[in-house]
Amino acid sequence: MGIATTGYLVAGSEDEAVEMANAVGYPVVLKIVSPDVVHKTDAGGVKLNLKHAEDVRRGYQAIVGAFKYQHIVGVSVQKMAAPGVEAIIGVTRDPSFGPVLMFGLGGVFVEVLKDVTFRVLPVTEADIAEMIGEIKGYPLLKGRRGVSVDIPALKALLMKISELVMAFPEIGELDLNPVFLYPEGNVAVDARIFVRDAEDAAPARAAKKQNMRDFFYPKSIAVLGASGVPGKLGYNVFRNLIFHEFKGKIYPINAKNDYVQGVKAHKNILDVPDPVDLAIVLVPAGAAQAAVEDCCRKGVRFLVVETAGFAETGEEGKKVHARIKEIIEANGCRVLGPNCSGVINTHHNMVQSIGLIEELGKGNVGMVAQAGAYAAGIITGLRHVLDFGIAATIGNKMDISEADLLEYPGQDDHIDVIAM
């Protein structure tokens, strides 16, 4: 990736260590190389600033003696790096957010002051500039007593780390500590990478990369279970889409009626001649599996299952929940719910709520809630105080979670604040 390091050679004996030290030039550093040793410095596995052959021999003997009960690959011999401003760069994988980049100054800044900052990968140049500027130690980077570090080179290093981790999902954890920052360039003095098993990395390779914009701004919606009978949930959801003048196409799916609320209906979503961006599933839980399978066959990327009667009801509901989850994972679909009240996006005239909703203003507030009743209460209760732009309910969060629902509204120009 073009990341500068001190380089290293691995010695298997004292004599080899001395030969290598003579080759790279003094002073040198010796480090234990062992899969059993992660924190080398704390365990006594690092010898710094060795200036002579005899220093190398003594250092080699001390390291090998200290780790005689561990599996030793050898002892690395590295050129001693010139001192610089110490930084730490790391990547971990969060269960909800995926790979997360960490940056901070090393030494006392990270150990005592915890002066670090985080961003979800991948990052942009603007993200990196914000990261560097928001740590408390930023004045040390910008310059003191006429000495500053190469900020453009630091930005390039952070971008390379982002590109590396995104290109190789097998990387479970990465740690560059320390990185020496100089007036010109930088060098990674020590690094460790934990590689995940292939089966652990596979889901990351097949990660659901669909643009969530199409979830919040679909061009077409099919409502499975749409009804023309007032009082039914299928009536309310379809009525809300019509009443609020949804900007895209809507397709009622009803096996018994040719028209639903004045709109031509189809017996099955597979009968819809045009592509469908999003499907709202309102059929009973017992029929939900077949409905989801039909949606997947149709090529629908996003489903909102508002029906209840799944994992929250007991063992049989849990089994249906599990089967539907297998279906969506096999087909690469995303599902909100089940047991939710869908999404409201006032800037797209889209109201999926199972309760009839009156006119709404177009606001700059986003909201994520677990329960539809809670979200509806907040929206209607505050409608004379503030206007919402996007409101989403997660229900049982079989697939789409609050983390997913934070990501896109955070990029939406209409939304300035998100409540959860």
Image: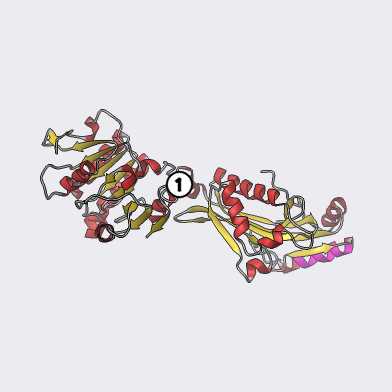
Q: Which residue is pictured at 26% across the width and 52% down the height? A: 341
Name the image quarter holding the C terminus: bottom left
Q: Position of residue 289 (x, y in %)?
A: 24, 44
- Compared to residue 398, the image places residue 106 above or below, namely below
Horizontally, residue 20 falls left or right of residue 397, namely right
The amino acid sitting under disc 1 is Pro
Q: Position of residue 149 (x, y in %)?
A: 73, 55
Residue at numbered disc 1: 203
Residue 256 on the magenta segment: no
Q: Which residue is pictured at 28% across the width and 60% down the height? A: 382
Main secondary structure type of the part rendered in magenta: helix
Q: Which residue is pictured at 32% across the width and 54% down the height? A: 387
Q: Which residues are magenta?
A: 54-64
Residue 60 on the magenta segment: yes
How is the protein colored in the picture? secondary structure
Horizontally, residue 360 falls left or right of residue 216, namely left
Q: Nearer the viewer, residue 283 or 42?
A: 283
Q: Position of residue 87 (x, y in %)?
A: 68, 59
Mark 1 residue element: helix
| Residue 398 can be seen in this image | no
Q: Position of residue 383 (x, y in %)?
A: 27, 57
| Residue 409 can be seen in this image | yes
The furthest residue to the bottom: 112
Name the image quarter holding the N terminus: top right
